[in-house]
Image (cartoon, rainbow, N blue to C red):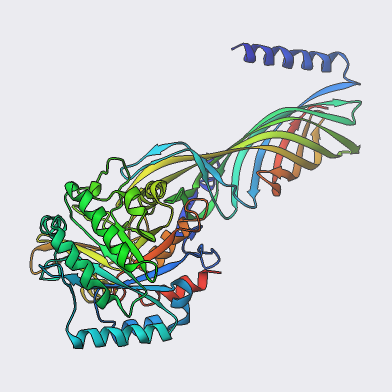
Amino acid sequence: MRVAVAASLALFFVVALARDARADFDFQLATGVNVRALRETPALTTKPITTSARTVEEGAVPMRGGMTFLGPYIDSSLTIDDRWMLPLIGFGAYGAIGSYDSVVTSRDGSIVRVRPWTTFAGEVLLPGLGYRAKERRWLFGGQLRTGVGWLTLDGSMASGADSNAIDLSRATFLLAAELEVCRRLDPVTRVCLAVAPRIYDHGLLNGATAGLRVEWGR
Amino acid sequence: MKRFVLLLLAACGSYSGEDTEKVGLGAETGIPPRHGTILIDGCVIDTWSRSTLAQPQTKKVAQELVMLCAVPREDGTVGPRDESAAAALSAAVDDLHKDGWRVNLGVAFTDESGQRYDGTQTSKFLSDGTWRARFVETLPAVLAPFDGVEIDLQGLPNDARSNVTELVFQIGKVVHPAKKLNVFVPPSIDVPSDLPGGQAFDRISLGANVDRMRIMTLDYSETTPGPTIDPGWAVDAVRLAKKDFVACDIAVPLYGTDFGPRGRRSTTWYEARAIAESGGVPIQRGPTGAPFLRFTTFGTEHHELWFDDATSTARTLGAWTFDVLPDDVGVLYYGLGAEDPTLFSELGARMP
């Protein structure tokens, strides 16, 4: 609750500042849909589990293959002097798209089957730094962005003729380089095409996002 | 609205119906190389099995053979003893030696039917000092052409513990140092043992007299249909044994088991495939990857047959990476002749 109140107050002051000194600061809000690619799925973590065959401690489950996701996101930023961009905070939620093989892998000698098509990927985008330039109705921008992300998947662990459901997950630090091209629709609304190679996403150069979004702000 | 629904549907990943193997199956996934031993259940290696053993890939997977052939008689005399059998065995072992194999003699403590382990009867024999002396006295003659001996005691009561240790101690005295002495040990995963008769094996005391323990991680499913091995359970059994004795092997089955209304019986890969082909029965895979089929025969007898093939065995071996089981753990392939004919070539191709 305290966090929510603090965030609301911060947002209020940011908007108020932007209104009072629009020439220097402006608050930007964006929302859109991204396609997100993960080149190589990282090893996932399972919680301790007891099956009819044995007890297995928490540990890593090797994975293989990449994944593609689709999902909405919302983002916010400040612009300074109509050039510098200070991305603030954003949220994204993605689900796996496409057809996937089940991944047969292992945890401490037990056979594990992972179902990549059940993947949910969440991310919280944290502050970064960027620069933008305008040319008539067009806007071009680039920014470095930090964040944290996580994956959760369903799977099962074999115990003889039975199998036990297991939850698998993995969190990561994110660092993305985002490039955008926008066209102004009216004085405060733009539609943008954004591409963001992930410098770090569960590994170096391990993915990218691309999508369309609508931005509000000058 | 329609577009929104389409978007939601697009965001749903789906199952292709195929497996991507991280362990065991994918040709690009290696199998950790381990010391391999192949067990032949009998005194004869038929021509089919001889051909299997002659393949370079088989020799890459395994370097040692166990012929589970010798049986002690009621007075403790170890057989076979007749000249014909001894000559045939000696010739077979010589032939295998020329082919580069180490060959050990397995001693099965079955009753005279050669099929059944009567633990109570065996325990009675072991408790008799005269019987043990006769066993130890007659073993060397049968063992002469072999490189070592393997003791396969099964179904013993827990109170046979001291007698088992004593027998192994006495065998060690006549076998060492010229030949190796190994013992088959039940796959307990707890202390005291969770298995009937598991306490009959004092691993620490036995360890002082043996070169290797073969942890018999087989017959995981005994009362209800299921796979012959669970790879995770087998790991726990070997880990527990290694706390008492370092040199341990893990066992993998080459045979299958048919669970029917009259009990269990061992089967081969070929029989399983023949039943599936001739009866039009689909082969499914269980959670561990072991194939199985359900069928009805003799009118109303419902059967469930579980077996292993190159796919499931490779998956099992692939799950035993060196961080799970150290590289000094060897593998005992149990039941040559019952295996998928492509098994050793597939395993060999996946080992460095």
In the image, A27 versus A209, the foreground residue is A209
Name the residue located 29 percent from the left edge and 52 percent from the top edge: A161
Q: Position of residue B150 (x, y in %)?
A: 30, 66
Q: Quadrant of residue B38?
A: bottom left
In the image, A190 versus B193, the foreground residue is B193
Name the residue located 46 percent from the left edge and 56 percent from the top edge: B320
Q: Is residue A132 above or below residue B284?
A: above
Q: Quadrant of residue A121?
A: top right
Q: Is residue B316 above or below residue A137?
A: below
Name the residue located 42 percent from the left edge and 86 percent from the top edge: B98
Q: Quadrant of the N terminus of chain A?
A: top right
Left or right: where B256 falls relative to B100: left
Q: Position of residue B256 (x, y in %)?
A: 26, 66
Q: How many marks?
A: 0
**Residue A124 visible here:** yes
In the image, B55 versus B157, the foreground residue is B157
Left or right: where A28 falls relative to A152: right
Q: Quadrant of the C terminus of chain A?
A: top right
Name the residue located 39 percent from the left edge and 69 percent from the top edge: B37
